[in-house]
Amino acid sequence: MHSSKGIVVLGSTGSIGRQTLDVVSQHPDKLHVVGLACGTRVAEMQRQAQRFGVADTAVGAEDALRLIDLDGVDIVVNALVGSAGLRASYKTLAAGKTLALANKESLVVGGDLLMPLAQQPGRLMPIDSEHGAIYQCLLGEDAREVTRLWVTASGGPFRGMTADQLAHVTARDALAHPTWNMGPKITIDSSTLMNKGLEVIEAHHLFAMPYERIAVVVQPQSAIHSMVEFADGSVKAHLGTTDMRIPIQFALSYPERWDAPVQPLDFRTLGSLDFAAPDTDAFRCLALAREAGRTGGTMPAAMNAANEVAVDAFLHDRCAFLDIPACVAQVMEAHVPHAVESIEQLEAVDAEARRQAALFLEGQGMA
Ligand code: MG
């Protein structure tokens, strides 16, 4: 006998938000929606609210915070885009509710503030295929016996290209991502490998793992969603169909597993699995994010803000693909990192890094 969990979806009209509601519609006896928040697509959210019988809705990240305190909220799905999601993550955990986190930027920027609030098992569930995979590989294991996390990467649409070739790619080219169905920001991040860099920092915080024990491997078929290596040399891998509704549903169903209307993998027709090291010379964002993570403190916040500004410019054809890593590197060089103290401090770092990033792009004659 299940009791139905009440969920709030922040970012309900984006890719993760819509797929979350799809999961809810598959399990009307186990999940119900208490509140919805969107950025700009208000009419679409109102249609969702009508369909799922939701009384409380909000527009914008600030208004969305109100929903977290509503009666009957068990789980907050944070699918906001960018560092704007940090406050919602913090407020959810501080209120003692479960955070189902698709907004990886809030962990990248504020992991030092969020993780002390998320020590109870199941309190912070990642909605990211790699981290959901690692989470599942770790179930029943002793964390002290883990020697390495293997975070898999599809390699993105520009895998195999040289820096010279990357100089000419456009946002339209990047948005033709081969594997996962995702929103525009994360799709560009996937094409620069910044997404994998953010995921390395995310894994560092979620699993309390030092950076030298988090490795990235390109697995172009995306059948392996990540792996965990143990002291005796054994490796556990998580495989499955590339459908974001599976990691979303696991974050909502944990500690149970529910049926999912997805095509299971057929290993007889899967063919080969390939592995390769990522090319961090051509795709500098992965190395830059790693460096920001290792530096720690406020450096990941500055790095992330610069990336958000540059990705937005690239999406609007206001800068070139290789200006994204150049902008991130420039802002990181100018930033003097401090230990993380508060959300207000991180927001100030974020604002200053955005200003620096905009200046840099202007100086390139693009923005
Ligand atoms: Mg991912």
Image: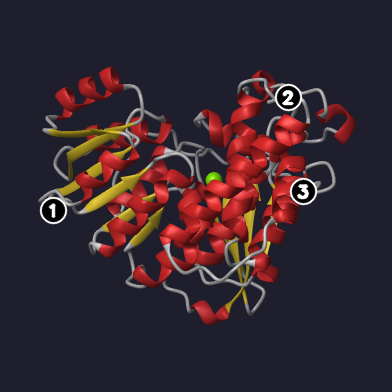
Horizontal side, residue 140 vs residue 36: left or right: right
- Residue 177, can we see it? no
What label sits on residue 366 in the rendered view?
Answer: 2
Residue drawn 45% across the image and 39% down it:
81
Position of the C terminus, as image quadrant, is: top right
Give the colour scheme of this rendering. secondary structure
Cα gap from disc 2 to disc 3, whole angstroms: 29 Å
Residue 357: image quadrant is: top right
Q: Residues within 10 Å of mark 2 (few under 14, many from 20)?
A: some
Q: Under 8 Å from ligand 1: the CB of mark 3?
A: no
Q: Amino acid at mark 2?
A: Met
Rendering coords of residue 288 (x, y %): 73, 53
Cα gap from disc 3 to disc 1, whole angstroms: 44 Å
Image height check: is 135 above or below 52? below
Question: Mark 1 or mark 2, which is nearer the start of the sequence?
Answer: 1
Residue highlighted by disc 3: 278
Closer to viewer: mark 2 or mark 1: 2
Question: Mark 1 or mark 3, which is nearer the start of the sequence?
Answer: 1
Image height check: is 30 above or below 166? below
Residue drawn 60% across the image and 36% down it:
309
Residue drawn 75% across the image and 55% down it:
333
Q: Secondary structure at mark 2?
A: loop
Rendering coords of residue 1 (x, y %): 10, 55
Q: Residues within 10 Å of mark 1 (few under 14, many from 20)?
A: few
